[in-house]
Amino acid sequence: MVAPTIEIGGLHVVRGGVTVIDELSLAVEGGVVTGLLGPSGSGKSTLMRAIVGVQIVAAGEVRVLGLPAGDPDLRRRVGYVTQAPSVYADLSVRENLAYFTRVLGVARTRSDQVIERVGLSDSAGRLVGRLSGGQKARVSLAAALLGEPEVLILDEPTVGLDPVLRRDLWDFFHELAAGGTTLLVSSHVMDEAARCERLLLLREGGILADLTPAALLERTGAPDLDAAFLKLVEGCATR
Amino acid sequence: MSPGRTAATASRVLSQLRRDPRTLVLLLAVPCGLMILVDQLFAGREQVFQSVGVPMLGIFPLTSMFLVTSITMLRERTTGTLERLLTTPLTKLELLAGYGIAFALVAVVQAIVVSLVGFGLLGLESVHSQLLIVGLAVANAILGMSFGLFVSAFAQTEFQAVQFMPAFVLPQILLCGLIVDRDQMATWLQWISAALPLTYAFDALDRAAHEPSLGPRFYADVAVVLGAMLLALVLGAATLRRRTP
């Protein structure tokens, strides 16, 4: 049996005196797109930061590809896209990617490939600061794709994108997953949840449900995922 | 340490500066304008300008590099690019060295331009080589850069970062001996002065400009400046945390 790509045991994270992740255990397998969903403040971003190894954790263990999260050997193998685009606004798209290409030590031709991939070829020479929110988000995503990482942690990568682009990106995520990449994608848009093979519903720092979209509908008897999610979250609150 | 990643970082920082020509012009024109202002202020009292002029050549780069670095590094922290970089193979040392190389190059240009104005246009004189003065000015610039890097960790906004200039650099300028000779200060002020790095940077420039023989004090000054620079860089590096709360 192959070990899961991401293994989390007893993770406990406290931020500013408040428990954000509470005794969370989880295993994520490769080759599928796993969706991380939950209301804002439920700990999605914190959990992702812990997996990438930039979050100070109070207790518990996070292992990625068999190594402790944040291990130097993982830095080429794990790609991470933060919620706010983390690229240089005062450089062009091409200059940004050229820099990350050199930092990651990948072939220079990768830069043009990923620009094409995220649909920014026409804007490659423009300053990132002059782009729209959705375009900036795609530059940030492109930078994470440069090194062809085995694991991609994407924190709300499709916020502010129009439906066509969202569909294209999700098709792309599935392409990557089919090629063996492990994707963990957070979202608060339920129609995206339908496109994940597996859903993790997070609430108050704990996992409320871990199932497929079909199972979520079946379990709640709700007509759509939006209603199902509300039912689950509120059902839990009144319990 | 990878020279490739360091050079990539230096050239990225320079590209960012190139994209901001107004800042570049300010970096070069403001110190020149201030030199001319001081020259005119002491018109008729030539020896005053001669005594403060050369040390000022070193104080400008220190101040401007302090400001530029603290703001750039703060931006790197607040926009998330620092966090992204720290999840890549780039090491803290490579990042700092990249910044150091880029700003040192800017400082060289700035020191040369201001020295050309001082020595060429305004008739400043120096006992020792003007190249030595430019070299000391660049060392001051890197000292300012390391301070800026360090204090950027304590600022949450650009407003705060800018306020660190009067809080952190201005007292050093007041107490370094430029305005009042150190031996004319109250004893407790002399003690504080002795603990501030700029005092030694000033003394080194002053000796290079006016003392025929440099002597051990000059070299001790330079050693203190380099030591303070390294200390600030190490402390600055310690504030670049891969894991944050």
Image: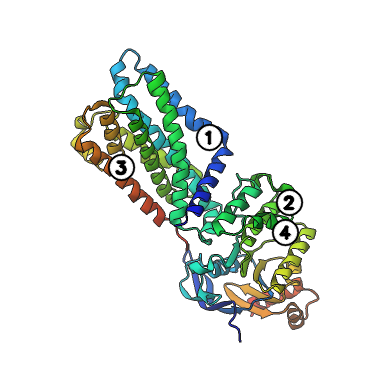
- 4 vs 1, front mark: 4
Residue B23 shows which numbered tag? Answer: 1
The residue singled out by tag 2 in the image is A121
Name the foreground residue: B183 vs B1: B1
- Tell me if residue B156 comes above or below residue A211 in the rendering: above
- Characterize the local packing of mark 3: few (<14), some (14-19) or many (20 or more) Cα atoms within 10 angstroms: many
Contact, mark 4 vs mark 2 (Cβ under 8 Å): no
Q: Mark 3 = which residue?
A: B225
| Badge 3 element | helix
Residue picked out by circle 4:
A117
Mark 2 or mark 3, whichever is nearer to me: 2
Classify mark 4: residues with Cα within 10 Å, few (<14), some (14-19) or many (20+): some
Label 3 with label 4: CB-CB less than 8 Å: no
Q: Residue at x 36, y 39 (%)?
A: B139
Left or right of B96 on screen, residue A234? right
Estimate the spatial distance between the alpha carbons at disc 4 and disc 1, rounded to whole Å: 35 Å
Q: Residue at x 51, y 67 (%)?
A: A53
